[in-house]
Image: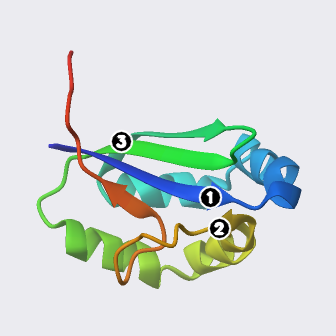
Amino acid sequence: MQRMGMVIGLQPDKVAEYKALHAAVWPEILALISACNITEYTIFLKEPENLLFGTWTYIGNDFAADMAKMAADPRNGEWWAVCMPCQKPLETRKEGEWWAMMEEVFHHD
């Protein structure tokens, strides 16, 4: 099990659209998230800065393979096509990242 966190910006003119999309996530996407060993997936929005913070727990054994499975899914490609234009990646993200991954520095159950 691994808890993961990530951050990205949100285009100011896309806040309402992004909220609406995530108020009714497509069932196939929710099923894919679970099939890729992701649980407890949550996205928070900080306004007015328009920062999205995502967190989840990964329960699988091969994160790279599960992410490749997710990326290869045609329906997920459609989902990303509507979500990604709403997002504004951080300039400081690592090469190859869309959402900037974060280091966990504290956790308490």
Q: Nearer the viewer, residue 79 or 50?
A: 50
Tell me where residue 3 sits by quadrant. top left
**Callout 1 secondary element:** strand
Q: Amino acid at mark 1?
A: Gly
Percent x, y for residue 8? 54, 58
- Give me the residue at 86% from left, 48% from top: 16
Is residue 92 shown above or below 73? above
Kindly indicate whether the residue at mark 1 contacts the one at mark 2 (C-beta within 8 angstroms): yes
- Give me the residue at 57% from left, 73% from top: 76
**Residue 91 falls left or right of residue 27:** left
Tell me where residue 84 sits by quadrant. bottom right
Kindly indicate whether the residue at mark 3 contacts the one at mark 2 (C-beta within 8 angstroms): no
* Quadrant into which the C terminus falls: top left
Q: Count residues near mark 3 (Cα–Cα under 10 Å), then give few for <14, some for 14-19, many for 20+.
A: some
Q: Label 3 belongs to which residue?
A: 39
Q: Label 1 belongs to which residue?
A: 9
Tell me where residue 39 sits by quadrant. top left
Scheme by which the image is coloured: rainbow
Which mark's residue is nearer the viewer, 2 or 3? 2
Is residue 43 shown above or below 18? above
Is residue 33 shown above or below 104? below
The first of marks 2 and 3 along the sequence is 3
Q: Amino acid at mark 2?
A: Lys
Q: Nearer the viewer, residue 107 or 49?
A: 49
**Callout 2 secondary element:** strand
The first of marks 3 and 1 along the sequence is 1
Percent x, y for residue 67? 33, 71
The first of marks 2 and 1 along the sequence is 1
Q: Label 2 belongs to which residue?
A: 88
Q: Nearer the viewer, residue 21 or 86?
A: 86
Which mark's residue is nearer the viewer, 3 or 1? 1
